[in-house]
């Protein structure tokens, strides 16, 4: 066989959370719950289901490559120009497109450690030199990140809040950081959990874009809006940056069912506000439960929580799996002793807590 792009061999393949059906099949379990991929535990809003039903009748046609209706709806909601938006097959695709567009071989990319794995995978593949700056008490060490910036730094990724820590950087920190970074470096804010954050000092990155044209933000319909299976996310930036990304984008990268559902969920905020509120209540329930079990956790601004189980986390994850509870072992992310659990429905969380108690 011919050799592949040499950077391919440097990549550790991404290991996703195990699908429910796979665990059922492999372990012969009847009831399995998945709290491993930060999904929304509830089905889409009835409006989204109806919109998909209509769109399904036309899947013999290619989708609208320009995402006209979704673009219009989102541009209005966010108060940005149409040409400041790009849509992707999940926001993952926007991350990958941005690295391809801006970081060539020998360029540098700065990320936190641990951080969302796609930043690392995309950068490695492009041949970029990766600087991984350790978190400090599970928060971004912005001073240390700034110290890594050189003339060849093309992108700095800031997951805000980041995964797996669940913490965020503030408006003030963001402004100080942007002031200190050269305009030739793209500062990429990944706001996949934006809709869950209630903190008053959470940064308004869209507002900062006028002053800092090297700033870009991504968000997604996969998390609070619960459309993970459809794969649709988006990026917001200057028209110039979006224009560059559009040159690389595949013409039909967002399918028509996804576009229809995304428009529909934007029109059903009431349904999703209720879910976000439920997640908040459930987060409190989980905190209380961890405290009563003497299990340490990191306060989260998302729909997942990083937990220190103290003992071998791979063993804990394996034992939970055998009992039909899928969570994420953080040892693979370099956090030995930690697991990450997504906030599920009330009954799922109850079952998780009971099972965790049994396992520990
Ligand atoms: C889940 C997640 C994403 C991406 O989700 P898509 O489904 O590709 O939109 C991006 N960033 C972070 C930090 C995430 O946790």
Image (cartoon, helix red, strand yellow):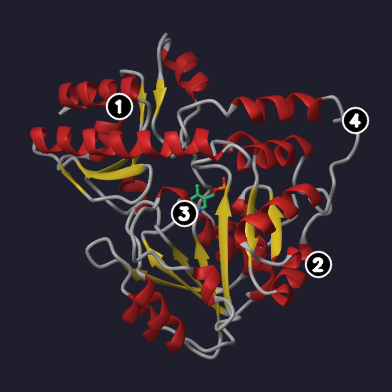
Q: Residue at x 50, y 69 (%)?
A: 205
How far apart are the two marked residues, 2 and 4, measured between alpha carbons?
26 Å
Q: Earlier in the sequence, mark 2 or mark 4?
A: 4
Q: Nearer the viewer, mark 1 or mark 3?
A: 3
- Residues packed near mark 1 inside 10 Å, few (<14), some (14 to 19) or many (20 plus): many
Q: Secondary structure at mark 1?
A: helix
How far apart are the two marked residues, 1 and 3, measured between alpha carbons?
22 Å
Quick check: is the Cβ at mark 3 less than 8 Å away from ligand 1?
no
Give residue 138's mark: none
Q: Marks 1 and 2: CB-CB under 8 Å?
A: no
The residue pinned by badge 2 equals 247
The part of the image, by quadrant, that contains residue 47 is top right
Give residue 194's mark: 3
How far apart are the two marked residues, 3 and 4, measured between alpha carbons?
34 Å
The residue pinned by badge 1 equals 349
Q: Is residue 4 visible?
A: no
Q: Earlier in the sequence, mark 3 or mark 2?
A: 3
Q: Residue at x 73, y 77 (%)?
A: 240
* x and y percentages locating residue 132 in the rendered image: 40, 70
- Residues packed near mark 4 inside 10 Å, few (<14), some (14 to 19) or many (20 plus): few
Q: Is residue 199 visible?
A: yes
Q: Residue at x 48, y 27 (%)?
A: 42
The image shows residue 177, relative to residue 114, as above or below, that is: below
Q: Nearer the viewer, mark 1 or mark 2?
A: 1
Q: Earlier in the sequence, mark 3 or mark 4?
A: 4
Q: Nearer the viewer, mark 3 or mark 4?
A: 3
Front one among 100 and 38: 38
State which quarter of the image contains the C terminus: top left
């Amino acid at each position: 066989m011919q050799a592949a792009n040499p950077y391919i061999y440097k990549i550790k393949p991404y290991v996703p959370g195990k699908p429910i059906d796979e665990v059922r099949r492999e372990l012969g379990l009847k009831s399995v719950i998945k709290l491993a991929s930060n999904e929304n535990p509830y089905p889409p809003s009835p409006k989204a289901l109806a919109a998909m039903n209509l769109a399904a009748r036309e899947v013999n046609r290619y989708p609208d490559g320009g995402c006209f209706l979704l673009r219009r709806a989102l541009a209005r909601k966010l108060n940005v120009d149409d040409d400041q938006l790009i849509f992707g097959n999940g926001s993952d695709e926007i991350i990958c497109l941005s690295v391809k567009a801006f970081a060539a071989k020998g360029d540098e990319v700065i990320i936190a450690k641990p951080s969302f794995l796609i930043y690392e995978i995309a950068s490695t593949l492009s041949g970029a030199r990766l600087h991984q700056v350790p978190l400090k008490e599970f928060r971004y060490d912005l001073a240390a990140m700034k110290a890594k910036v050189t003339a060849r730094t093309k992108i700095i990724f800031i997951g805000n809040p980041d995964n797996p820590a669940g913490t965020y950087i503030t408006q003030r920190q963001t402004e100080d950081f942007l002031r200190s970074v050269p305009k030739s470096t793209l500062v990429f804010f990944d706001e996949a959990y934006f809709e869950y954050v209630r903190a008053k000092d959470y940064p308004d990155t869209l507002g900062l874009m006028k002053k800092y044209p090297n700033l870009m933000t991504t968000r997604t319909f996969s998390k609070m809006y619960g459309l993970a299976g459809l794969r649709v996310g988006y990026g917001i930036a200057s028209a110039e940056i979006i224009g560059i990304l559009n040159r690389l984008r595949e013409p039909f990268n967002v399918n028509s069912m996804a576009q229809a559902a995304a428009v529909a969920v934007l029109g059903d905020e009431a349904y999703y506000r209720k879910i976000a509120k439920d997640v908040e209540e459930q987060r409190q329930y989980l905190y209380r439960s961890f405290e009563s079990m003497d299990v340490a956790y990191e306060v989260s601004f998302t729909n997942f929580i990083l937990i220190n189980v103290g003992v071998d986390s791979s063993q804990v994850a394996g034992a939970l799996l055998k009992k039909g509870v899928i969570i994420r072992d953080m040892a693979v992310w370099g956090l030995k002793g930690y697991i990450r659990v997504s906030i599920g429905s009330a009954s799922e969380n109850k079952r998780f807590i009971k099972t965790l108690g049994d396992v520990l």
